[in-house]
Image (cartoon, rainbow, N blue to C red):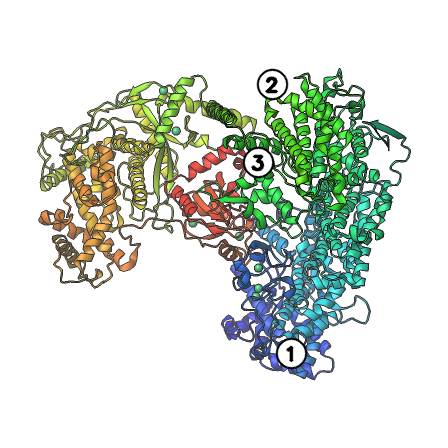
Amino acid sequence: MISGSGFFFLQQQLSTEEGAKMAAAQSDRDLPSALCAEFLNFSAKDTASRWLAAADLKQQVYRHLAVYVPRILCLGPSGGGSSREEQREEQREELACQLLLLAPMEWLLLGEEPSSGLALLQEKNQPSPLCGHVFKVGEPTYSCRECAADPTCVLCMQCFLGSVHKEHRYRMTTSGGGGFCDCGDAEAWKKGPYCQKHTPTDNNRDTEEDPVAQLPADMVARSYSIFSIILRYAVDMLTWDQEDQLPAGLEPPARGDTYYCMLFNDEVHTYEQVIYTLQKAVNCSQKEAVSFATTVDRDGRKSVRYGDFQFCEQAKSVIVRNTSRQSKPLRVEVMHSSVVAHQCFALKALSWLGQIIQYSDGLRRILCQVGLQIGPEGENSSLVDQLMLNDSKMWKGARNIYHQLLMNSLLMDLKYKKIFAIQFAKNYRRLQTDFMEDDHERVVSVTSLSVQLFTVPTMARMLMVEENLMTTIIRTFVDHLRHRDLQGRFQFDRYTAQQAFKFGRVQSLIGDLKYVLISRPSEWSDLLRLKFLEGLDAFLELLKCMQGMDPVVRQVGQHIEMEPEWEAAFTLQMKLTHIISMIQEWCSTDERVLIEAYRKCLSALSHCHSGLPDGEQPISLSLAGHCVETFRYQVSQDKVSIHLPVCRLLAGLHVLLSRTEVASRFPEQLPLGELSPPLLIELPLRCLVLCAQVHAGMWRRNGFSLINQIYYYHNVKCRVEMFDKDIIMLQAGASMMDPNHFLMIVLSRFELFHIFSSVDCRKRYREANKDVIQQNNTLIEEMLHLIIMVVGERYVSGVGQVEPFDEVRREIIHQLSIRPMAHSELVKALPENGNKETGLERVIDSVASFKKPGVTGRGLYELRPEWYKYFNLYFHHYSRADQSKAEEAQRKLRRQNGEDTALPPPLPPLLCPLFASLVNLLQCDVLLAVEGAVLQWAVEPSGGGWTESMLQRVLHLVGVALLEEQQQLENSSGDDDVTFNYTCKISRPGEAPSTSGSVLALLESLQNAPHLEVHKDMITWILKMVANIKTMRERTSSSSSVTISQGQGPEEMVRDRDKAERKRKAEMARLRREKIMAQMSEMQKHFINENKELFQQSLEDLEASGSPADTSPPSLEQSGVSQVCVGPRRMGGAKHRQLVTCILCQEEQEVRGHGRAMVLAAFVQRSTVLSKNRLRNLPDPEHHDPLFMHPDLSLGIHTASCGHIMHATCWQRYFESVQLKEQRRQQRLRGHTSYDVENGEFLCPLCECLSNTVIPLLPHTHSPDHSVDHPSLEAWLKTTNQHIAALHVAHRKQSEGVSEGAEPVVPEGFRVDFTPQNPFSSSVSEMITTFSMSTYKVGLKLNPNEQDPRVQVLIWSTCAYTIQSIERLLMDEEKPLFGSLPCRQDDCLSSLTRFSSSCWTAAPPATAHTHCIRLLSALVPDSQVENTPCVLDIDMFHLLVYSVLSYSSVHSLDQSRQRVVDSAHLHLLHLITVAHLVQILLTSTTEEVCMDEDSVGSEEEEFTCQLYNTLRNHLGSVLPEVSSGWQLCRCVKAGVLPFLRAAALFFHYLNSTAPPADLLVAGPGQWEALCSYLSLPSNLLQLYQSQHTLLEPLIHRWCCHPGVRQTLRGGGVIVRFPRESNRLIDLPEDYSVLINQASSFTCPRSGGDKSRAPTLCLVCGSMLCSQSYCCQTEVDGEDVGACTAHTFTCGAGLGLFLRVRESQVLFVAGKTKGCFHPPPYLDDYGETDQGLKRGNPLHLCAERYRKIERLWRDHGIAEVIGHAQEANQTLVAIDWQHL
Ligand SMILES: [Zn+2]
Ligand SMILES: [Zn+2]
Ligand SMILES: [Zn+2]
Ligand SMILES: [Zn+2]
Ligand SMILES: [Zn+2]
Ligand SMILES: [Zn+2]
Ligand SMILES: [Zn+2]
C-alpha cells in the first residue's frame, strides 16, 4: 500500500510556474497537469468527513467518482509498448487514483490517517492460520504424497520448507497460476497441516469467534457502507454492457467525443493473425502490433485506437472485415472513454478491497457479508452472484481480478466459504453452461474455483447432502453430451480439433466429480446414503449411454472406406476410469450402500440385456458327455462393442461382495438368484473373443481404429475398468456355472466348438485352407490363454485371498522379469489411482534392488532372485511382445544359473469362497478333452495342425492343475475333503469317442519326442509333479506333506551342466556375431561400402585414436639427456619420415612440402570460453586489428580436429559430392541438414565429426644447426634493429617512391628485396589457402579475402588460443602437460603449429615483415611504429607465438648465416618472459599476511623485490608498497606458470622435441623441468638480473606508456595472473530453488509480465525471457529470440542454457542449430525429469554438471549438436533462433 506518501513525486513534476502555463494549454495530453493544481488543494481527510456528513453517502461517492475518474484515467492513446513516457503516464494515473479516489475512502473507513490506521488494524488482527498464498504462474508448489488428502492439496515453498513434509515423500510441480497454498487447512492434510509460521498459537482466536466483534462498532458501520458502495460500483461497471452510456449517477459533467477502439481476446485467432490485422487496421508498426497482441492475450482486451467516434469505428470495421473470413471475427467495440475509465477504476477498486481486507479478518468478514447479502431481487441477487453469473461475459483481466478477490475474501473465511460454496453449487449448472459457450481457458473461468470448494471433504459431503451435488454434476455432464444414436447411446462425430475443444470443456465436469468423490466418507448418514445412491442412479444412466457404444461389425471382402470414430468414446472411458473406481471404493465402505448399489447396477444391466437373446435361436451344444443350451451368436458376423461399463461396474461390485464378505453374511439380501451366469458372461466374452479374432488377423479389413481400441482396452490407462473387469466377470460367471457348460460356451463363442466336438477331434481336423488353419490355431492359443487367466488370475483382493499390496508387487515382479527398469518406466507400467499413486514405493524395495546410474543413463531396479519363482509366463497384463521378451530373459537367467529352463506356473493364491468353485474348471471333462486333443496333435512332428504355443499353454494348464492339487493336499487335514483329483483324472484313458491314451500317457510319450526338445524340461517337471502327488496321496494317511524334490542324480546334474555350458558358449558366440553384424551394417550405412577390408582397417585406426596418444612419436629418441625445446640447443626435428594413410583411398603417403597434400579434417569456431570480460563488444569485423590480443581473451578462435587424415584431392572429391547431394536434397525437401554445407561444413567421412575445414600436414622443421654461434641478446637486438631499420626504409621507398636521408647500415647478407622460394607444391599451397580462408571467415565473419594482411594473424591467433585453452584444461584436470592428450588433439596441435609457422609463405613478404616489426615494437620501442599497446593490454603468450612465427619471414631475408633463427626464438622467449613478469608484478594484489619475516629471503625473493621496487620507482604510488618478498615471489611464480606451460606446448609442437620425463607425469619437480625444457633458469628473475643494463631501459619504457598508469588507476579492465579458469555458473542443489527464482523473473521488455519460458545462461548466469515475441531482437537483419540473441554477445554464437520450466539443457550454435541435453538434475531414482512431468524432487548431480562444463570448455558443444541432429532429424526442423 502507498498512502499519502507521493507528494514528493508530484512536486517534482510540477514546478508551479510551468504547471500553470501547461494548464492553460488545454489539450488532451495536458489534462493531468491541469489536475495538478487540484491535487495540491485536495484533502482526502476533508472529503471523507464531507461524505460522512452527507445524508446519502452513495450519491456523494458517485458524484466524486463521476467527476474525477474520467479526468484521471484513460486519457488518450495508449501505445503498444512500454515506452518510458507511457510508464510515466501509468505511474501518474496510479498516483492520482490513490490520492484523489482511494485515499478519501481509506479516511472514511479508518477515521484516521490511513497508514497508521492500517498498521493499527494489522497489529490487532489475529489472523487465521490459513496461508492462502495465491500462486503465480510457474511458481513451485509442493504436495506430500504421504499426508495430502488429495493431490490438489499443495503448499507454497515458504510453508513447505517450514513443514514436516519436506522429510516425507513429496511431489513438486509448477503452478499453472491460480489456486492457493493449503497450509493451515486441517482437512487438507492427514498429518502436519501447519508449517512453523502458520502453527496456531494461544494468541490465535478461537475459530468460532466472530472477528467482526474485534472491531470498533463505528468502524464496522462505516465499512459496511463503504464496502457495499464500492463493491456495487465495481460490479455494475464490470458487468456493464453499454458502450456509450454510464449507470445513473456516474454521468460525467462534461462529455467529449473521445472513444476507444477496444480489441478483445479470443481463443480462435492466432497471434500472427492478430498482429497482421492490427498493422493493417490501425496502421501501426509490427512492434506495436506485437505489443498490442501480447496485452490482449494477457489482459483479455486492449484499446488499439483513441480518437473520435468515426475514427474508431473505421478501425473496428477493418478488423472485423479482416478476421471474419474463416471464422467468427475478432470482437471489437468502440467505447466511450469515460466508460473505459470507470471500468478501469472498478478494477483498481477491487484490488484495493482485496488489499484492505488483508489487514483485518474482521474487515474480510464484513466484505464477505456485503458480497453475499441477498439483494431485493431475491435469489441470485447478491453481488457475488452477479459477478459469477456474468463471468463469461467479462474480459480476462476483469475476471482475474475478481477471482483473486474471491480467493482473498470468501475462500479465506471458513464461515463464508461454506455459504459461497452453496451458492456456487446452486448455480453450478448455469455456470457450467456459460463456460461451455465461453471460449476462454478454464483457469480464467469462475468454474475453476470448484477445486477450492469441492476438495474440502466436509464441504463436498455437505454439498452432496444439501445441494445434491453429485447428481447435479452428472446430470449436467450427461446433458452436455448430446450426440446419441437411436438406442440412446452416445455417438460421437469425427474427433475434430473444434470438437476436442468442446469435449475438453465437458470433461472438466468429470474433474469436479472426482474432487467430490476423492475422499471416501468415514461415516455415513442416512441422507448421505440416499444422495449417493441418487447420484449412482444418475451415474448408471450415464453408463447405460456408454454400454454398447461404437459397435463394430467385421468387414469382409473389402476394406472399410472410412475409419470410424473411436477416440471420443475412449477419452470418455479414460476420464471416467477413476470415477468408476472411486464409486466402488465408496460402496466398499458401507454394507447397505453396497447391497443397494449392487441391486441398482444389476437392474441397469438387465435393462441393457433386455433383448439380448431375442430373435436368436436357442441351440444346444454337447461335448464330452455334457450338454448346454445357448443361443446362436457369432462375433465374426454380428455387432460387437468394446464398451461395457455397466457389466464392468457390476463385476467390480461383485468382487466387493466377496471382499467385504457381505455375500456370505447377508446372502438373503442379495439378488443373487436373479443372476443368469450365461448372460453375465456373454458380453465380456464377446469382447475378449473380438480381441482374439483381431490377433488372429480376422479383422484386418476393419482398419486401424479397431487396432487402436484393442490397444487401449489393454492399456494401463484403461485396463482396470475394462480388460481386468471382463476377466473378473468371466471368473464370477464360471464360479456360478457348471465348468463344462462354461467351457462349451467359451468354445462356441471362439467359434472353435466344431473342432473339439467332432468325432475324431484328436486327429486334427484338416482344413484345406491354410489361412483358416492358422486363424484357428491362433484362436485356440488365445482361448487357452483365456482359460489360464480365468483360473489363474487371483491377485485381486476378493477373487483370491490377497491384499492390494500383493497385487502391486506382482505387477512389479512381472515388469522386472522382462528386464531391469527405471523408476519412471515402472510407474508408467502401473495403473494410477485417483490420487496419482501406484503403490509402487510401498513394495519396490522388498522385491528389487536399486542400481545407481553412472554419469550417463539412469538408475535401474533389478528383481531380487528370491522372487524369480513368482514369474508367470501367462501374466495377464503382458502384451505378446512383453511375453516373449520375458520368456527369453527368464530362460536365459535359468540357463546362466545352471537350472533347467522349464518355466512352470507359480503357486497360485487361494481363492475366496465366492470364487472357490473356479478350480473345477481345471479338472472338468471338457478341458481334459481339449488338453488331450492338443497333446495328441503334438505327437505328429509337424503339418500345421498344432503350434508350439498351443502345447506350451496346455502344459501350463496341466501345471496349474497339479499345483492346485498339491496345495489342496498340503492344506487338507484328512484325505476325504480333497475333492480335487486331477492326477487321477489324467491317468484315465481317453473316453469314447477318442480312445487313445490318457493325458498322462500322452505326456509320457511326448517327453522324449525329439521335435519337442524345447518343452522337455517342462514335461519332465510335470511328470515329477505327478509322481510327487501320487506319493503324497499314498502318504496322506500319515498327513505328512511332501514338496517336490528338486534333487537330481549326480550324473544327470553333470550332464545338464555340461549342456548348459555348451548352450551358454553358443549363446556368447551368437551375441558376438550379432554385435559384429550390427557394427558392420552401421559402418556400411555411413561409409563407403565397396572396400570392406580397408574399412576394417580404418576402423581400427579410429579405435586407436580414442586412447591417449603415445608419449612421443616413436621415432623421436628419448634419451636421458635433458631435453630442450627452444633455442640453439634444442633437440628433434626432421630426421624421420612421416608416413600417413588416407582414410578415403587407404593409400599411404609421406608428408612432404613438395608432395601431394595431405589434410586433417578440422573444425574452426569462435570461442569465448576463456573470456575474462563478457561485456566487451564483439569487434567490428572491417576495422578490427587482431595483432595484439588483449589479456582478457574476450574472443578467440578455436580449432579442433577428429584427427582423420585424407589426401587433399580425396577430400575435395568427397566434399564436392556432399555439396551435390545437398543441392539435390534441397530441391526435393527444403529442410536443413545438421551441417551447413554452404558454410563449408561437412561430416568427417569416417567418424561423422562436424568439420568445416581441413588443415594441411606439413613436414617437421629442420634440425638445428649446432655449428653456428649463438649471438648474445645484445648482439641479436642490435642486428634485429638494423634489419628493421632497413625494412622501414625499404617500405617507405615502396610506398612513397622516394628515398630520403641516409641509407641505414644494412648488416651483411641482409637483402630487403629478397623473395624466398616457396617451399611448397601447388597442392599444399592450395590447402594452405583453404585453411587460412576458413579461419579468416570464421574469425572475422567476413567473406574470404586472400589479400587481407590479417589472414596470417588469425592463423597465429587460433594456434595460440587453442594451445592456451588446452593448457587450461590440462591444468584444471591435474593432468600432466605432456602425454595425456588424446591422439586427435595431439595431431591437431602439431599440424596446427607447424602450419602456422609456414603460412607466411602464402602471402606477400612485406605483410609478414610489417607484422613482425609491429610486434617487436611492443617489446623494443620503435619510434617509427605508432599505436603500440601498453604491456598491460597484451596477452604475452599470443605475443610470443606471433613474434616467433612472424620472425621467420624477416629472418628469411638474411642470407648470410642460416639457422640463427633458433637463437632468435630463445631471445624472444626471454624478452617476453621478462615482460610478462613485469605485467604480473604490475597487476599483482598481495594481501598482507603476517609471515615470519625472520626467515632470510631466498635469492629469488630478493630479486623479485628488486624488480618490484624498480617498477615502483617508475610508477610511484600507483603501485602499493609490498614488504613480503615471499608473497611477491609466490605470486609471480603462480602467475607465470600458465604462460610457461603454454610456451612449452608451443615449442614442443613447433620443433618436434620430445618432452622430458618429468613432464609426462603429474607430480613435483614440474617447475624445474619446465624451465629447463624451455632453456630458462629456474629462477626466472635471473633473466632480468643477468641482463640488467640492457633490460632496465626497456622496462622503463614499458612503464612509461601512458596506458599503464591509466589502467592501474582504474581506467580499464585489469586482468590479473594467473587468469582464473572460467566455469559454468553455480547451480543450486535443490531444483525448486531455481523454479522459484524463475517464477519471480519478469520479462525485461514488457513491464513486469511473467516470462513464459525463463531460461538461464549457464555461462554468465543471466536469466532470459525465451521463446516469446516480447524479447525478440534483431541480429544480422533477422528477428531472433532472447537465447539466440544472448549467445551472440555472451558466447560468440554458441550458448548453453537451462530451460527452467522444462528442466532441460539447451545448446544452441548460430541461428539454425541446437539440441536439448539432459539436465544435471536427478531425482532419488537416478532419473532426470525433462519437462518436469513426474514431480519427484530433483537434486543437482555434480558429476553430470561437470561433464557438461567439460564439454563446453573443450569446445565440444557444436559437435554434440551435430551428432544430436544427425541422430534425430526432428531437431533439424526446430526454429532454434526463436528460442
Ligand atoms: Zn503457504
Ligand atoms: Zn504455512
Ligand atoms: Zn507429509
Ligand atoms: Zn586418398
Ligand atoms: Zn574423423
Ligand atoms: Zn550468458
Ligand atoms: Zn519477454
The answer to which quarter of the image holds residue 727 is top right
Q: Is mark 1 within 8 Å of ligand 1?
A: no
- The reply to whether dot 3 and dot 1 touch (C-beta < 8 Å) is no
Identify the residue shown where x is 36% and y is 45%.
1169
Tell me, yes or no, if residue 775 can be seen here: no
C-alpha separation, residue under disc 1 versus residue under disc 2? 100 Å
CA distance separating discs 3 and 1: 71 Å
Q: Is residue 1530 above or below residue 1379?
A: below
Give me the C-alpha separation between circle 3 and circle 2: 29 Å
Residue where numbered disc 3 is placed: 818
Which secondary structure, mark 1?
helix
Residue 1466 position in % (x across, y down): 16, 39
- Viewer-proximal residue, 802 or 1? 802
Q: Which mark is residue 1010?
A: 2
Which residue is farthest front?
A: 1038
Q: Would residue 603 be visible to someone looking at this image?
A: yes
Q: Nearer the viewer, residue 629 or 1325?
A: 629
Q: Is residue 169 left or right of residue 1524?
A: right
The yes-or-no answer for disc 3 within 8 Å of ligand 3 is no
Which quadrant of the view contains residue 1264?
Answer: top left
Which of the two labelled residues, at mark 3 and mark 2, occupies the earlier sequence position? 3
Compare marks 1 and 2 and give the one earlier in the sequence.
Answer: 1
Percent of width and height locating residue 1482: 22, 55
Mark 2 near ligand 5 (CB under 8 Å)? no
Circle 3: residue type:
Ile
For the residue marked with disc 1, what is the amino acid? Leu
545 or 98, which lies in front?
545
* Residue contact at pointers 3 and 2, CB within 8 angstroms: no
**Residue 73 appears at what percent x and percent y?**
63, 66
| Type of amino acid under label 2 | Pro
